[in-house]
Image (cartoon, grey):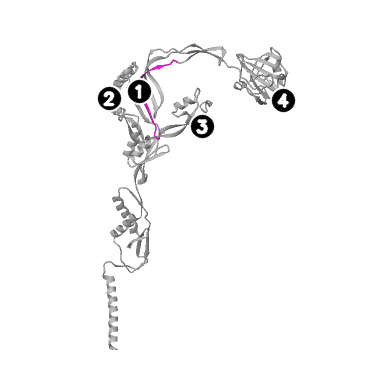
């Protein structure tokens, strides 16, 4: 019994001692601080859901996060993006263990690094029409744009020079092809400008004008490339992009210089033919026919103003250039016309046959990419004069021809037929329209009636001679309304259709004769 009481006493003493030691530790240990009871006085900082430290002032949290970001940015070569959701929770306490600033910053850096979104680095974006190319440096931009120029020059007579786009308010760069020679000349002129004043400047201008007036020889020209320029608007802007969106310099050069199919529209001009359009637009004729529903084959009719879809290979960045060239060639003189007011425009006669001449030429040729667009003759010397072709042609507008009846069904075509009416020719010399007896028949064109009456196999018939030497015939009529010698106008009523003569039914037989021979009327009717 005594032993049990003794152990109880010892146990009670142990716990009292432990409590006193713990209480003393709270006051004496440096990691814990006694705080005043004034409401929320201890603040727990959480970053992206992770506790990073405990502070006594909420203002510390934001400044420590800024410090952590700053240290990460200083150690990274690229733009560092990360989520940063900061929260501060306060509560009241008598004692608290506050976290040191260095430890909190280190904890924040660890959380931010673990929450990094994606590495983004500075880049430069080239925009040309709808194409956008992203490169890592302005040097690569310059090299890519230089590659577009180098396709058309040997060496680097022209270089890509970047500069601010004066038409834009924002910080946008553009590019121009600058001649090294031209640049040096501009610099020299700028240096000499103060000296070029008064009499000295006037004298220099006189010398310059005198030199300009001097007639040049073929040896005076600087043959070769004279101008190179970008044909498309180029915009260059600085940007920040993920690494996987930045292209290599080799890929950028390929995009800028490789020819691609660009759909274009061509408007048909006077004198154009399909074959000439195909040659000039550098497109196979069969491909052009395939692209246009209005074209059935190489013989399809085209009209001035008609729009044709063409596809010509073009690079993403087009280049214009000019070259001075020397060449010798045979040439044809322009055709000369002698106009005859008594002839129709369809009447022509060659008065003189042509022969080619020979000449020496210094010319300025303009190109858009690989296609020649213009030739300007700078100097020409004819060694053998060309003889022009001389053609006499009429000026009068020839008569037109219209269908002689309204309506009707085309019942017999011009040409050979298998089963004609008994006694009729197997070769049909006109065309027939089936139409009821009594249908109005009009003159197809203005002219003079030379026959009106019965015509054997034709039945009742009318012949009309026209001013262009042609003749029209109207057969199987039921009634003739004109007489020989009458002058009739186009569309004037001359007869009624019928079923007379060698005929199997009510219809109108119609012929057109040129030089006394029948031709297919359908080829001449408007």
Ranked by sequence position, the earlier of labels 2 and 3 is 2
Residue 328 covered by magenta stretch: yes
Foreground label between 2 and 3? 3
Q: CA distance from mark 4 to mark 1?
A: 74 Å
Percent x, y of residue 264:
46, 32
Ranked by sequence position, the earlier of labels 1 and 3 is 3
Q: Residue beneath label 1, please?
A: 324
Q: Tag 3, which secondary structure?
A: loop
Q: Residue beneath label 2, please?
A: 195
Q: Tag 2, which secondary structure?
A: helix
Q: Tag 4, which secondary structure?
A: loop
| Residue 265, visible in the rendered structure | no
Q: CA distance from mark 1 to mark 3?
A: 38 Å
Foreground of the two, 99 or 433: 433
The quarter holding residue 10 reads bottom left
- Looking at the picture, does residue 211 appear above or below residue 236? above
Q: CA distance from mark 1 to mark 2?
A: 34 Å
Ranked by sequence position, the earlier of labels 1 and 2 is 2
Ranked by sequence position, the earlier of labels 4 and 1 is 1
Instruction: Say left or right for 397 vs 463.
Output: left
Q: Which residues are magenta?
A: 315-333
Ranked by sequence position, the earlier of labels 2 and 4 is 2
Dots 2 and 3: beta carbons under 8 Å? Answer: no
- Looking at the picture, does residue 441 appear above or below residue 31? above
């Amino acid at each position: 019994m005594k032993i049990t009481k003794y152990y109880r006493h010892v146990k009670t003493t142990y716990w009292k001692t432990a409590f006193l030691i713990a209480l003393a530790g709270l006051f004496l240990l440096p990691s814990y601080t006694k705080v005043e009871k004034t409401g929320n006085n201890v603040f727990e900082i959480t970053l992206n859901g992770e506790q990073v430290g405990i502070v006594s002032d909420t203002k510390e949290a934001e400044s420590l996060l800024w410090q952590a970001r700053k240290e990460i940015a200083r150690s990274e070569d690229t733009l560092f993006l990360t989520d940063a959701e900061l929260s501060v929770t306060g509560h009241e306490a008598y004692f608290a263990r506050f976290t040191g600033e260095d430890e909190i910053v280190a904890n924040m850096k660890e959380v931010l690094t673990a929450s990094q979104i994606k590495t983004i680095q500075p880049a430069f974006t080239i925009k040309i029409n709808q194409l956008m190319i992203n490169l890592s440096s302005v040097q690569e931009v310059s090299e890519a744009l230089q590659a577009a120029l180098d396709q058309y020059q040997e060496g680097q007579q022209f270089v890509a020079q970047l500069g601010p786009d004066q038409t834009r308010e924002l910080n946008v760069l553009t590019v121009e092809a600058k001649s090294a020679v031209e640049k040096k000349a501009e610099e020299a002129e700028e240096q000499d400008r103060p000296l070029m004043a008064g009499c000295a400047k006037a004298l220099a201008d006189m010398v310059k004008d005198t030199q300009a007036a001097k007639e040049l020889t073929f040896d005076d020209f600087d043959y070769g490339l004279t101008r190179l320029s970008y044909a498309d608007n180029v915009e260059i802007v600085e940007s920040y992009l993920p690494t996987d969106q930045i292209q290599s310099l080799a890929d950028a050069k390929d995009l800028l210089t490789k020819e691609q199919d660009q759909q274009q529209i061509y408007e048909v001009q006077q004198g154009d033919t399909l074959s000439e359009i195909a040659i000039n637009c550098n497109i196979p004729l069969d491909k052009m026919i395939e692209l246009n529903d209005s074209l059935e084959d190489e013989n399809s009719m085209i009209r001035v103003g008609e729009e044709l879809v063409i596809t010509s290979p073009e690079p993403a960045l087009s280049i214009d250039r000019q070259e001075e060239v020397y060449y010798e060639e045979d040439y044809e003189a322009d055709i000369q016309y002698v106009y005859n007011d008594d002839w129709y425009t369809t009447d022509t006669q060659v008065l003189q046959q042509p022969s080619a001449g020979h000449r020496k030429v210094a010319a300025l040729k303009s190109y858009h990419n690989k296609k020649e667009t213009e030739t300007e003759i700078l100097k020409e010397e004819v060694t053998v004069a060309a003889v022009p072709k001389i053609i006499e042609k009429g000026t009068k507008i020839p008569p037109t021809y219209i269908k002689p009846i309204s309506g009707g069904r085309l019942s017999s075509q011009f040409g050979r037929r298998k089963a004609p009416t008994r006694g009729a020719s197997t070769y049909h010399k006109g065309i027939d329209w089936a139409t009821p007896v009594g249908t109005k028949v009009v003159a197809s064109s203005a002219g003079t009636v030379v026959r009106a009456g019965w015509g054997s196999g034709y039945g009742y018939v009318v012949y009309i001679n026209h001013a262009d030497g042609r003749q029209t015939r109207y057969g199987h009529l039921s009634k003739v309304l004109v007489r020989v010698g009458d002058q009739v106008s186009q569309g004037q009523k001359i007869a009624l259709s019928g079923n007379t003569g060698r005929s199997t039914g009510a219809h109108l037989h119609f012929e057109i004769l040129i030089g006394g021979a029948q031709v297919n009327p359908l080829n001449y009717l408007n």
